Amino acid sequence: MGRYGDELRRITRAQGGAPAPEPTEPDPPASGHRRHVLLVAAAIVVVLAGVGWVIVRQLMADSKLQDCVMSGRKNCAPVEIDSAGR
């Protein structure tokens, strides 16, 4: 917590406050299950970010098309013609 937190705990105990906490053992290192859960969560975040990116790109393209149509133009959407079929 820091210097001030340690000092505050010491003063509180000296005034008859809470008893000194029992020393606890440090947390064990992350188990295999925890790592698996974190990996799955990271994969989900990456997939959601990718889907969001695709949606944003589509919305931008639709917005450009809508702006073109609203400005009164008639050739906004390109029509693809197969050159081999001519």
Image (spheres, rainbow, N blue to C red):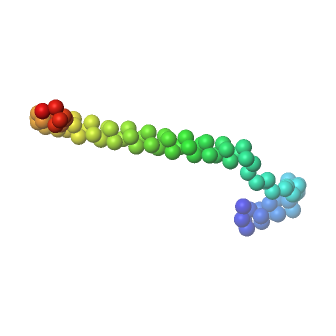
User: Residue at image x 87%, y 62%?
Assistant: 14
Q: Seen from this angle, which residue lies furthest bottom?
A: 3
4 up-or-down from 68: above or below: below
User: Residue at image x 57%, y 46%?
Assistant: 42
**Residue 19 pos. (x, y %):** 88, 55
**Residue 74 pos. (x, y %):** 11, 33
26 up-or-down from 41: above or below: below
User: Residue at image x 38%, y 38%?
Assistant: 55
Q: Is residue 49 visible?
A: yes
| Count of picture labels | 0
**Residue 47 pos. (x, y %):** 50, 41
Apparent side of residue 46 relative to residue 37 in the rendered image (left or right): left
Apparent side of residue 59 relative to residue 12 in the rendered image (left or right): left
Front residue of this view, candidates 24 and 78: 78
Front residue of this view, candidates 6 and 26: 26
User: Residue at image x 73%, y 47%?
Assistant: 32
Q: Seen from this angle, which residue lies furthest top?
A: 85
Image quadrant of residue 33? top right
**Residue 71 pos. (x, y %):** 13, 37
Q: Is residue 77 visible?
A: no
